Image: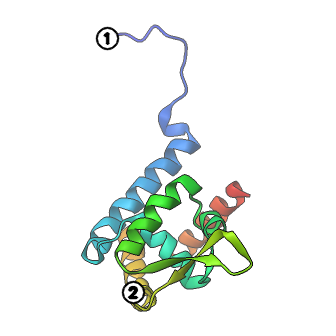
Amino acid sequence: MRNDFLPAARLDEQLCFALYSASSRLTSIYRPLLAPLGLTYPQFIVLMALWEEDAISISQLADRAGLSKATMTPLLKRLEQKGLIQRQLLADNERQKSVVLTEAGRTLSLQSTDITERAFCATNLTKQQAHDIMALCQKLVE
């Protein structure tokens, strides 16, 4: 079939598609590593944020994890059902809740380094390449 349309944007020349494809690939790398723990990649992201700073508001956690508040509600509910977090009312603001790791949630952090190292190895990137990509992505986010 002949393409008589005007020249179109090429998919393989689009930054958005390159980032989307890379993100999908990384998620697929993490999936089998997280499956034995019963975690999804977004749940793992939220736990990593909490391992860095525990007992923060849902809004702060959503910002740190790069997730919408609408996404956070069902995700936190599942993590709470798994016994990894608790949602508690903030002492100084009873309208907001903070997210606090349980002992099981803190213990799970011990496996995180192995998981992230195995995922990194699967990318076949050097540490410098990974650092450069992360710096460029951070620049894009800013």
Quadrant of residue 56 within the rendered picture: bottom right
Q: Left of 61 or right of it: where is 107?
A: left
Total tally of numbered discs in the picture: 2
Quadrant occupied by the C terminus? bottom right
Q: Residues within 10 Å of mark 1 (few under 14, many from 20)?
A: few
| CB contact under 8 Å: marks 1 and 2 | no
> What x and y, as percent, mark residue 116?
42, 78
**Amino acid found under the numbered disc labelled 1:** Met
Q: Residue at x 42, y 83 (%)?
A: 112
Q: Residue at x 48, y 34 (%)?
A: 11
Residue where numbered disc 2 is placed: 108
Q: Toward the viewer: 84 or 120?
A: 84
Q: Is residue 42 visible?
A: no
Q: Secondary structure at mark 1?
A: loop
> Residue 23: horizontal and vertical position, in percent?
46, 56
Q: Nearer the viewer, mark 1 or mark 2?
A: 2
First along the sequence among labels 1 and 2: 1
Residue wearing tag 1: 1
6 and 51: which one is in front? 51
> Marks 1/2: CA distance?
54 Å
Q: Tell me if residue 22 comes above or below residue 3 in the rendering.
A: below
* Secondary structure under the numbered disc 2 in the rendered image: helix
Task: Determine whether 106 is above or below 61 in the image.
Answer: below
Name which residue type carries label 2.
Leu
